[in-house]
Image (spheres, rainbow, N blue to C red):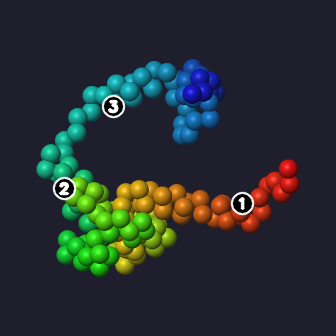
Amino acid sequence: MNDEICGKWMPRKGVACARGYGHGGKCASAQAMNNHRLRSRERVRTDSSEALRRRRGRSGRLRKYNLTEAQFNSLVKSQGNVCGMCHEPFGPGRRICIDHDHACCPGRERSCGKCVRGVLCLRCNITLGHIEGLGELARIYLNKPPVTTI
């Protein structure tokens, strides 16, 4: 970890910034950072356990993708109860991820539901996310590698 601090002088406060070098956002004094740390520790979540369970559970994920339980079950059944990428069966307790086109609903917290492509296992969902994020860079690299001869 980089131990350097920003050190930019803040004339209104009469102190130097104590945040890390190259930090994002506004500069902050050591006292302001400590106060924020203390407030964060004291903050108590007011959500009920039922609300947390709903938001984290399958029904919360289905709402995020604008799907009903019946639509989700139909989607899994239409894929033969297997992952759409690796074709491994969804066993009991195995997480089923809903795959959708991120370009369809950019900047929205919820999907329109029309951009759902299928269901994936967690491993394939993570892998596909990396592929989509770096796919263009990989194509550029493979078309013209930086080293042609050694």
Q: Amino acid at mark 1?
A: Tyr
In the image, residue 116 lies at what x, y percent? Answer: 37, 74
Q: Quadrant of residue 20?
A: top right
Give the residue at x 38% y 27%: 37
Residue located beneath label 1 in the image: 141
Is 47 placed above or below 126 here?
above
Q: Amino acid at mark 2?
A: Arg
Seen from the viewer's position, the closer of residues 75 and 108 is: 75
Give the residue at x 31% y 28%: 41
Instruction: Count residues near mark 3 (Cα–Cα under 10 Å), then give few for <14, some for 14-19, many for 20+.
Output: few
**Seen in the image, is 89 located left or right of residue 36?**
left
Q: Count how many numbered circles sit on residues in the image.
A: 3
Q: Quadrant of residue 76?
A: bottom left
| Residue 11 visible in the shown view | no
Q: Quadrant of residue 139?
A: bottom right
Q: Amino acid at mark 3?
A: Ser
Q: CA distance from mark 1 to mark 2?
A: 43 Å
In the image, residue 90 lies at what x, y percent? Answer: 28, 63
**Seen in the image, is 70 located left or right of residue 96?**
left
